[in-house]
Image (cartoon, helix red, strand yellow):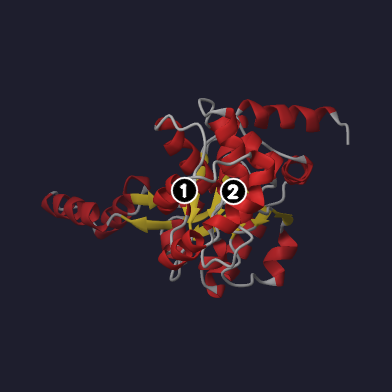
């Protein structure tokens, strides 16, 4: 699909060293054009959060990140009052014999308001990019509250009043599918699924992010990662682990893989001891599966 704005967006992403594809470019473009949140789902470590970071840099705007977790509530997402400073200020007002009305008016002002991510986004001086990261880790009750904010873009603080957004934030939500999100939230968003990259894309990412890596080694790493992900693992490694491994081996001036090297560095790629043990026991088979293509050193 040829469109001047699409190509401009693609170039902006490439300028930020982000290897993209048509589905990502089109989804981000339409989310901006329609002013709708973009919900990105996929396995952990495939680059969902990175899209938001890259887009913020490409848009030359601020990234406001809200990391979701079990038990997150509206208070921690919107605002809190700085009670310690309020108490100190109250003591000062008492010494000045201020009236109760003056005390209340003085205590509940911007100087004591601790803005959390949602309020930061609503009151930002220009259109920010609001990243709601791992929304699936938050409770359903918080999801309902979030849906209301995304619909109205205003909040009410009892002591101050209603605050409306002057600039509607660009919103990206990410989910690892820890739990199923509500249909209401899904309907509110555009949707993008990102899977583990294929060999060609992963190789392009490695060579862009780790330019000093040996060409042969980068091919071997990506072929090996493609095969590792086909195993039954507790924690399948993502592109982040591939990049960590590539960077580590490049810094060691390694130019090819062998079994001993792979076995001793699996802790960079796999984060579960059973996965490491299983892969170590399968190294010969893994090397055989990719050896014909990459000419891996099978003698190590």
Name the foreground residue: 144 vs 107.
Answer: 144
How many numbered dots are placed on residues in this image?
A: 2
Q: Depth check: 70 or 226 in front?
A: 226
Name the residue at the left extreme: 95
SS for dot 2: helix
Check the image and report above or below for 229 versus 182: above
Residue occupying image coordinates x 64% and y 60%: 230
* Residue holding disc 2: 224
Question: Could you classify mark 1 by the number of other residues whose Cα lies within 10 Å: few (under 14), some (14-19), or many (20 or more)?
Answer: some
Image point 73% across, 31% down: which residue?
10
**Dot 1: element:** helix
**Label at residue 283:** none
Query: x, y percentage for residue 164?
Result: 58, 50
**Label 1 belongs to which residue?**
262
- Report the quarter where the N terminus lies: top right
- Give the farthest residue toward the right: 1
Q: Residue at 59% across / 68% down in the picture?
A: 232
């Amino acid at each position: 699909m040829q469109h001047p704005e699409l190509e401009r967006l693609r170039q902006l992403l490439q300028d930020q060293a982000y290897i993209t594809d048509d589905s990502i470019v089109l989804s981000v473009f339409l989310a901006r054009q329609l002013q709708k949140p973009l919900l990105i789902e996929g396995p952990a470590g495939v680059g969902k959060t990175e899209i938001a970071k890259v887009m913020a840099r490409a848009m030359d705007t601020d990234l406001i990140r809200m990391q979701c977790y079990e038990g997150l509530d509206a208070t921690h997402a919107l605002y809190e009052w700085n009670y310690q400073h309020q108490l100190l200020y109250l003591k000062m007002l008492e010494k000045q014999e201020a009236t109760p009305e003056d005390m209340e008016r003085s205590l509940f002002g911007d100087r004591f308001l601790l803005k959390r991510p949602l309020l930061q986004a609503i009151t930002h001086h220009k259109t920010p990019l609001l990243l709601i990261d791992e929304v699936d880790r938050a409770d359903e009750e918080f999801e309902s509250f979030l849906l209301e904010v995304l619909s109205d873009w205003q909040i009410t603080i009892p002591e101050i009043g209603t605050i409306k957004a002057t600039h509607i934030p660009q919103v990206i939500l990410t989910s690892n599918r820890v739990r199923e999100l509500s249909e209401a939230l899904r309907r509110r968003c555009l949707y993008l699924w990102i899977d583990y990259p294929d060999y060609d894309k992963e190789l392009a990412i490695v060579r862009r992010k780790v330019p000093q890596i040996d060409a042969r080694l980068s091919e071997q790493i990506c072929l090996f990662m493609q095969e590792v992900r086909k195993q039954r693992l507790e924690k399948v490694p993502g592109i982040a682990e591939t990049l960590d491994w590539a960077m580590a081996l490049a810094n060691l001036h390694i130019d090819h893989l062998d079994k001993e090297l792979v076995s001793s560095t699996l802790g960079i790629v796999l984060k579960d001891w059973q996965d490491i043990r299983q892969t170590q026991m399968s190294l010969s088979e893994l090397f055989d599966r990719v050896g014909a293509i990459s000419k891996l050193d099978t003698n190590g």
